[in-house]
Image (spheres, rainbow, N blue to C red):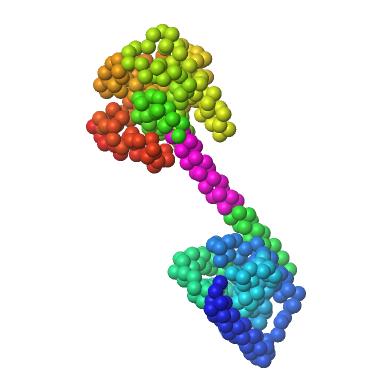
Amino acid sequence: MTINQHRLLTGYVSVLAAAALTLCLVLVLLGHRVESPSVVILLAIATAVSERWSVQLSATSGLTVYLLPTVFAAVVFGPLEAGIVGAASMLGDPELGRGNADRAPALKWMNYTAASFITGALAGITAQALVNETYGGIVLATFAAMAVAEASDLLFAALTSQVRRRSMRELALRGAPVAVTSFLVYAPVVAVLVIAYEKISPLTIVLFVVPTLAFQRLYTLYQRERRLGDELRNVNETLARANLSFAVALVTALEASDAYTAGHSRAVATYSRDIASRMALTSEETDRAFLCGLVHDIGKVGLPPSLLGKDGPLTLEERRQMQEHSAIGERILREVAAYDDIATIVRHHHERIDGHGYPDGIIGANIPMVSKIIAVADAYNAMTSDRPYRPAMVYPAARDRLLQAMGSQFHTDAVVAFLSVLAESSDDYRYARGPGFGSLAESPTPRELPRAASVGVA
């Protein structure tokens, strides 16, 4: 806070405090006295505690239920008592007594104490002008007092915001809906409690104080849990971006020794994600399918470059050596603490439903679902890509191969889901061209990538 801002705020608070003291003096001179001091003290304690448990709406504003006991006092007793109850709320301010040059706790306390006194007094004046012994008179007085209190509270908040040179528009957008909602919820509650106090017994004040504070506390705890949930989501999103960046770095290293792997890894990742989505898997599983598809061949960094770059078909011994890449990939990924499940999926992406796959020869029920999905995406992209020793298959031929191996090599649901995606897509998507199949260096997060349907319909 600058010196000029501090002076402006000090002047504003001084005027407001003088207005509150003047109003208090006028009320006393007019004959107003504090009736039922014990009840007023109890209500004052309730407002102070509610302020202590206020719910933060932003860095500079919060929500409390202090207007409930204030309006109750306004209707039952009058403006002086309501002003005192309202002003007492700031005794529970968590910042009271703390040194903070920017927030100026002392000025804040004086500001809101004066404003709350005036708000309560205005609500009391309104209520006493309308209240009578009938139920209708009590309800009318309560609703009118609550309306005046909410409007006054919002007005003083706006004036303070203006003096502190903060956005009044932001405060109005945030505060007006809260004020309207509070009026609609609180006014009927206070009216019922006033009627109970007046018509049944003053002891019903306990029914007012305890539920009010309990509600405030529960709402505070809810807001705290929600903030923790938001923070956890932000951490998870950051971790997801870090995981993807790390995966891209791994695959980029692989590209140096096997140029084919670059486009293949991106294609398998995109296809795997879309298969998982079509199978209605959760968003977490869908994102995992993309990430695992991206790193499914990372084990090839542990193979000889001469094997990866061979122009012709592999010999039997070379084929066996090539099959080690899934186990090597698992060992590499297992070194990353957050990649344990990814390492397992990568290890099993060449297993077959009938148990004749590698490296472990496990049957379908024991193969992770994402591994089954990657197996389909991997095989299809391999078939529809040019290799030094054979040309790429056309889409219909690759589709027929998937159908023929369905239930033996490939998981039936994964094949059906993928063929459904391919049937709705363009040739660019079927042959891993265009959006979604670009450079790994430009890889967005999985959820930012275009889905198959957005690539174009054939």
Write the residue at 41% across / 20% down: 305
State left or right for residue 379 relative to residue 33: left
- Is residue 315 depicted above or below 10 in this figure? above
Q: Quadrant of residue 399?
A: top left
Could you tell me if residue 110 is visible in this image? yes
Q: Which residues are magenta?
A: 225-248
Say left or right for 288 vs 399: right
Residue found farthest to the left: 458
Q: Is residue 389 left or right of residue 212?
A: left
Give percent across and percent down for residue 249. 45, 34
The picture quadrant where one finds residue 39 is bottom right
Q: Quadrant of residue 398?
A: top left
Specify the farthest residue to the right: 38
Total number of numbered discs in the rendering: 0
Question: Looking at the image, which residue is at 49% across and 73% down?
Answer: 165
Vertical side of 168 occupied by 218: above or below: above
Q: Is residue 193 above or below residue 440?
A: below
Q: Position of residue 232 (x, y in %)?
A: 56, 46
